[in-house]
Amino acid sequence: MEGDGWVYTVSAKSLLEDVFTSVSLKRSLEKDENSSAAQHPYVIGRCAIADDAAIDLASEAAAAAAPGWAAVPLERRLRLGTRFREELVRRADEFVEMLVAESHPVKLARWELSCLLQIYSEESIGWYAQQMHTEFEKDGRRLIVRRQPDGVVAFNPPQNAPAPSAALAVLALMAGNAVVVRAPRSIALSTLWILRDIAAPLLEEMGAPPGTLNVVCANPKQTLDRWITSPLIDDIFYIGGSQEGLRFQERCVAHGKKPILELAGNDGIVVWKDADITYAAEAITEAFYGSGQICMVPNYVLVHPEIADDLLAEVERQVAGVRPGYPDEEDVLLSPVRRSERFFGLLQGALDKGARLVTGGKRTELDGTPSETGVFLQPTVLRVDGLGTAREYDVVRHETFFPLLPVVVAEPGPDDVLLDRFLDFVNANEYGLRNSLWARDENVVDTFVRRVVNGGLLKINDSHIGFLPYLPSHGGTGLTGGVFGEANYPMLKTSHVQGISIAHDVSPRSAVFGD
């Protein structure tokens, strides 16, 4: 429908080549949509802005569609996930091009696509089906444990990865919910594309009621305020910072909404003394992908003191290959960083407390040349000695969202004591998204598997950020997930359990008293 003006997207490459021209083009078009600036190659698309009436209309459309869509059999709704995956595979090049245009390095864009393909894989969908509906026979009764849709689910994806996050709305649709999604005004195009051009035609193909999926491009506060006070919205899926998210959770609960939170992560990698140092360092360098502006990258490392020097040397060697550049260049992994003053404040604070700089610590230009005005930040590694005081460092205790990684070297001691201390440190993390371990000793591995209770995912001798079938893709504990964080699967978060018993020739008195 017609919007209240337009927001225009210019390519990320153009912002690095000629930021003045790019910004001027956007301003010209926002003043006059018929401006010749629309023909400039830097301009790649536009999205209509939703006003209050349009935001409310989307909620009304979803509420009207919800009962009809919920009545569609689960098996048919699950087919939506299969078809969505097929379309992502068929249009993989478009998906990657869209994300690259919005500043995602091409390698990371392919990783984001691979994550969605695992979330919607045949194995994962089979697992969702099992969780959504299971039946048993017991004492002349047919027992059913199933999950029912919550109703209308509103999604608020983040600015750092809006399209892949908005794609989770398809899971809420598979659960039987109607959905409203807000596309971020500052970076709306990929979100509108993945939902309007891929998901919506699939719903039409399946005969879903009009209004099952709705997308608006609007201001976040304006939209969230209307969702919270709307009697038509049941769940709000919020992705953002922890402090803002927990305050938002309180508002949701006060208004009778289910808050579904994907907040900051503060993921840790533990490297034991017998680890494969080369592979462990590969996983550690994932901390710098996208300049650390991804919630599930590693944020700190705990290392056994016997291999600390060797590990730091290998990490420094591998980090040298993580470079800035244009997002369409194959070997680029760093993204531009806005508002980098906090990065330098955190870095200096850590150095003042006794951390040692291993590598990095400066701004850099496109070609990797250190510069006071560069829009990239060098991958930066710090050495922090001692577990006992490590959490006194802000860079260890909290997510930084920068390419800034502290490596905490434990004090020497017996291995059984160190293992206990490592486990205590991981479990005491206020956040809880992902944890990972590098070790060959089966006893160490088994002990971690038994005793790590923090986080939604534990990876062992594997990529920290890689997605896999079956395993929960989102959610976690503590400041990461809020009160519903442990559910982990977006389909389960946007639905609720219902138990059913269908009896055959059973006496009620006998059922109660055992007569």
Image: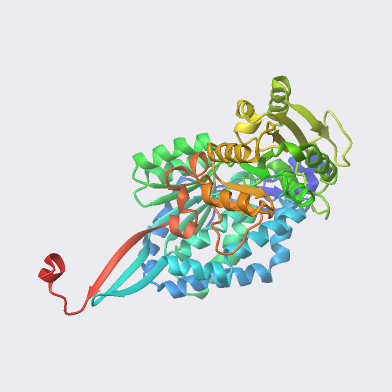
Q: Is residue 45 above or below residue 229?
A: below
Along the viewing direction, whichever of 513 and 160 lies nearer the viewer: 513
- Horizontal and vertical percent position of residue 148: 36, 63
- Horizontal and vertical percent position of residue 242: 53, 37
Q: How many labels were placed on the picture?
A: 0
Color scheme of the displayed model: rainbow
Q: Is residue 183 left or right of residue 133?
A: right
Along the viewing direction, whichever of 62 and 414 lies nearer the viewer: 414
- Horizontal and vertical percent position of residue 147: 37, 63
Residue at horizontal 37 percent and vertical 47 percent from the top = 257
Residue at horizontal 38 percent and vertical 67 percent from the top = 70
Q: Is residue 379 left or right of residue 399?
A: right
Quarter of the view holding residue 118: bottom right
Along the viewing direction, whichever of 428 and 103 lies nearer the viewer: 428
Observer able to see residue 241:
no
Looking at the rendered image, the quarter that the C terminus falls into is bottom left
Residue at horizontal 40 percent and vertical 74 percent from the top = 73
Quarter of the view holding residue 384: top right
Along the viewing direction, whichever of 417 and 148 lies nearer the viewer: 417
- Horizontal and vertical percent position of residue 423: 57, 41
Q: Is residue 394 above or below residue 223?
A: above
Observer able to see residue 364:
yes
Toward the bottom, the furthest residue is 505
Q: Is residue 2 above or below residue 414?
A: below
